[in-house]
Amino acid sequence: MDSSDVERSFQVSPETERFLCERLLDQNQPISERFRVLFSLRNLRGAAPAMRLSKVYDMYVIVNILLNLSGTTRDTSNLLAHEAAFALGQMQDAEAIPALETVLNDLSLHPIVRHEAAEALGAIGLERNVPLLKNSLTSDPAQEVRETCELALSRIEELKNMSISKSSPFLSVDPAAPANCSSVQELREILLNEEKSMYERYAALFALRNLGEEEAISAIVESLGANSALLRHELLSVETLEMIGWSWFLVPVAYVLGQLQNKKASDALSQVLRDVKEHPMVRHEAAEALGSIADDQCIALLEEFAKDPEPIVSQSCEVALSMLDFERSGKSFELTETDPVNKLTSLGVVEDLFLEVVEFSTWRSLKV
């Protein structure tokens, strides 16, 4: 656990932890509340050896969400399952590999969930994951999943050839190491070149994100026209999220735009969210990115599309709006330990529950 993990982590009593786990598995809870618990559980810590046992238990609960094993019927939220896979990848724990393999091979699951499982296997970065990814690279019917497998395989290979030890300025485990180039024009040409490999384009994308200047943001916005939904998804989250605070090619684009929190991207993101023909995962990242920009126009759009017939989109808007409510009240979407919160204790489930609110930007920085 590095210093940034320590800053984000917190400790609670076993009773509180059990309560949070049960709340995560409760399909009757609002999706925003389940998201809040998911990211809080990810950061629990405790004294050894209790810390290890606690982590395994929390991972088991998250895996239950991911595998939809919490009841006789499957969990209805593909978005939550996708986020659970993301959380497991960011935890980088080999114990999650069997569950991620099961998800990746289950073609009955939504492609966005399989995609995130593949990305998580790449984030964990172990050689034992290579056969799993190669199998899905040749057999999965969804282009976005195959592209993610290609990307994850490249990352694992890159880990063998170099040290990707430098942490992301956004405190995330990125699917590709930023390219060693500081020329915005060169990076733009690579990003927009459909003949380049997905890994090369991702590397250019994250390098542009780290530069963060206006010319770099313009290049990222321009790439929203890419043929790959995977890349468009990442673009939306990187540009907006890194400059603002909140993954495939369009998915990473949206993801990056959200991280950058740059209002210049607002119009492009709004068009993506409004486009009902766009891939739901790309629209999801656009919604999160707009939540990071959080001006009046973005908020109005999120409120409008919180009623979208596509659950992945409507739930993304609901979560984004909920996070904004916490931010406005000076609180965080995550939970820690020192401030008393009577809301949960009033339910009669947990006594003496103490939580501390951490800065909202901390949670946002995890979604890279």
Image: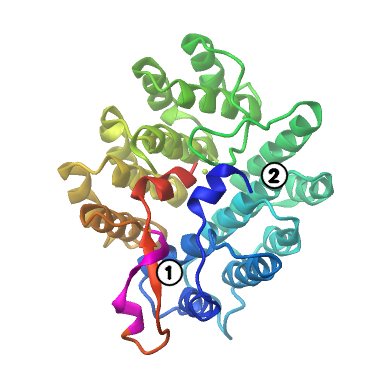
Please provide percent x and percent y for residue 208. Answer: 48, 22
Please provide percent x and percent y for residue 318. Answer: 31, 60
Q: Amino acid at mark 1?
A: Arg
Query: What colouring style does the render use?
Result: rainbow
Q: Residue at x 51, y 9 (%)?
A: 183
- Residue occupied by mark 1: 34
125 to the left or right of 79: right
**Along the viewing direction, whichever of 338 and 156 lies nearer the viewer:** 338
Please, what secondary structure does the residue beneath circle 2 have?
helix
In magenta, the rendered stretch is: 334-345
Q: Amino acid at mark 2?
A: Gly
Against 341, residue 157 (above or below) is: above
**Along the viewing direction, whichever of 44 and 283 lies nearer the viewer:** 44
Q: Residue at x 39, y 44 (%)?
A: 246
**Mark 1, other Cα within 10 Å: few <14 / some 14–19 / many ≥20:** many
Examine the structure image and report whether residue 232 is included in the region drawn in magenta. no
Please provide percent x and percent y for residue 155. Answer: 71, 35
Task: Give the CA distance from mark 2 to mark 1.
Answer: 25 Å
Q: Does the image show residue 279?
A: yes
Please, what secondary structure does the residue beneath circle 1 have?
helix
362 to the left or right of 115: left
- Residue occupied by mark 2: 122
Please provide percent x and percent y for residue 174. Answer: 58, 38
Against 161, residue 131 (above or below) is: below
Of marks 2 and 1, which one's residue comes earlier in the chain? 1
**Along the viewing direction, whichever of 84 and 37 lies nearer the viewer:** 37
- Quadrant of the image occupied by residue 61: bottom right
Q: Does the image show residue 277?
A: no
**Mark 2, other Cα within 10 Å: few <14 / some 14–19 / many ≥20:** many
Q: Residue at x 38, y 77 (%)?
A: 29
146 to the left or right of 255: right
